Amino acid sequence: MDIQMPVMDGLQAARRIRRLGQAPGGARFAELPIIAMTALAMASDAQASQDAGMNDHIAKPIDPDHLLATISRWMKAPGLPVPGAEPGGTPAGPGGHGGEHAGGPPRLPADLLALGHLDAADGVRRIGGRPAPYRKQLRRFRAQYGGAIETLRELLAQENTAAAEAHCHALKGVAGNLGARALFAHVSEIDALLKQDQVPDAAQLDAAETLLRGVLADIDSLADEAPPPAPAVPPTPAALRALVERLRRALGTDLGAVEPLLDELDRGAAGTPLQPAVREIAARIDRFELDAALALLASLPIPPEDAP
C-alpha cells in the first residue's frame, strides 16, 4: 500500500480496510496483510503505518530482496527468498540490506563499474540484473532530469511549494532506483524540508546541483549505443495491442524484460499521436509508479484495425 496517493492516502485506506474487518462477514479485511510502501524511512513513519493497521513497512527505493522477504513473511509463500530480514525492518536508503542478486551480484561491464557517482550494481539489481536496461534508464534520466535542480529553483522562486515537493519527490525516487546514493540522500533531506513547508537554502540547492552534475558526468562517460532501427513497416493496431499486453504482463512479473518491450513500443509509436503517451509511460516506469504506468497503458488510444 503506497502511503502517498492522491485523493486518499495509504494510511486512510488502511484504516478503512480495518474498519471493514469489524463489520459482519468482514473477517478477511481484519486479517488481510497490508504492507506500507513509502519514500520515507523514519521510525515515526513506520509507527504511523502500524497505528493505521498496517502489518509492515518498506521504504523506497524498493530493494527487491527485502520486498520478497517481507511478502514471504506475511503471505507465508513457499519458494520466496528470505535474506534474514527482521520484521518491520526497512533498508537504510538505497541498497537496503539485501545487497546481492538472487544468483549473486550481477556481473557488470568495466565502464559501469568505473562510475563514481552511481552504484551501478545496486541499480542493475533493482531492475532484474540486466545492464542494458539500466543503461537506457540512465539515458532517460539524463534527458528528463538533467535540469532538475534548476527546475526546482524556478518552482521555489514562484513560491509553488507543492509543485516543488512533487518534483523533488520524483527526482528522489528515480535517483534512488538508479543507485545515485549521495544524490538520493541529499534530495531526501530537501524533500523532507518541503514536506514541512520549509524552503531549502541556496547552499543546499547548490550541493544538490553539484551531486546531480556528478551523476550526469557519469552517464555522459558511457559509450553511446546505436539506436535500434525503426520498423520498415509501421506495426498494425493488432500488433500494437499484442505488444501492450506483453508489456502489461512484464510489469507484473519481470521488470528486467520491460525495457526492450518499452523500446519496441516507442519505435512502433514513433511519429504517431501515441508517442507522447508512450514516453509518459516510460517516465512512470522509471519512477516505479507501476500502477500509473499500467493505467496509461490501458488507456492508450490505439486505432481500430480498419482505421486508415
Image (spheres, rainbow, N blue to C red):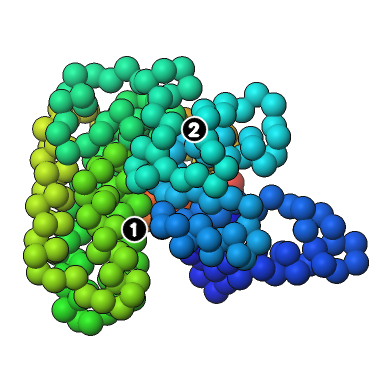
Of tags 2 and 1, the one toward the viewer is 2
Image location of residue 297, percent across then percent down: 52, 51
Assign the N terminus to one quadrant of the image.
Answer: bottom right
Relative to 71, is 197 on the left or the right? left
Mark 1 lies on residue: 170
The local secondary structure at tag 2 comes to: helix
Relative to 243, is 210 on the left or the right? left
Q: Is residue 170 visible?
A: yes
The local secondary structure at tag 1 comes to: helix
Image location of residue 54, percent across then percent down: 63, 57
Q: Which residue is drawn at the image coordinates 25% and 64% (left, top)? A: 190
Q: Which residue is drawn at the image coordinates 90% and 62% (left, top)? A: 25
Which residue ends up furthest to the right in the rendered image? 24
Q: Quadrant of residue 178?
A: top left
Image location of residue 39, percent across then percent down: 41, 56
- Foreground: 60 or 144? 60
Of pointers 2 and 1, the one earlier in the residue sequence: 2
Q: Which residue is drawn at the image coordinates 84% and 57% (left, top)? A: 27
- Foreground: 43 or 83? 43
**Can you say whether 129 is above or below 277 in the image?**
above
CA neighbours of label 1 inside 10 A, class few (<14), some (14 to 19), many (20+): many
Q: CA distance from mark 2 to mark 1?
A: 23 Å
Mark 2 lies on residue: 65
Q: Is residue 167 visible?
A: no
**At label 1, which amino acid type do we have?**
Ala
**At label 2, which amino acid type do we have?**
Asp
**Can you say whether 284 is above or below 242 in the image?**
below
Q: Which residue is drawn at the image coordinates 9% and 52% (left, top)? A: 210
Image location of residue 153, percent across then percent down: 16, 70
Q: Quadrant of residue 204?
A: bottom left
